[in-house]
Image (cartoon, rainbow, N blue to C red):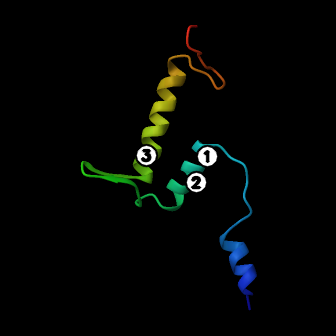
Amino acid sequence: MITRRAALDDRHRPWQPRTLAAMLDSVAGQYPDRPFVITEQGTLSYAELAGWSARLARGLAASGVRPGDHRRDGE
């Protein structure tokens, strides 16, 4: 018999540091059809957001943007 604590520990794993992108991919994998945002114009699911995010990342990488790149005002 699983104790209540063990069931909670199994369902809610200890927090692990990760990027926003990794968190989005994880949630989109678990709940792809759930709404991420709902507006009067429509609904965007986690899977749609993850796809949009991946396309944006590929486009930025293709244009030469690399992790850690940044630009300050005036540069």
Image spot of residue 45 (x, y percent): 39, 53
Q: Which numbered disc covers residue 63?
A: none
Q: CA distance from mark 2 to mark 1?
A: 6 Å
Residue 61 or residue 3, whichever sits in front: 3
Q: Secondary structure at mark 1?
A: helix
Q: Residue, x 59% and y 16% (percent of image)? A: 71
> Label 3 belongs to which residue?
49
Q: CA distance from mark 3 to mark 2?
A: 12 Å
* Label 1 environment density (alpha carbons within 10 Å; few <14, some 14–19, many ≥20): few
Q: Is residue 44 left or right of residue 8?
A: left
Q: CA distance from mark 3 to mark 1?
A: 13 Å
Q: Residue, x 69% and y 80% (percent of image)? A: 7
Name the outermost residue toward the front.
74
Image spot of residue 57 (x, y percent): 51, 31
Q: Which numbered disc covers residue 22?
A: 1
Name the outermost residue toward the left.
41
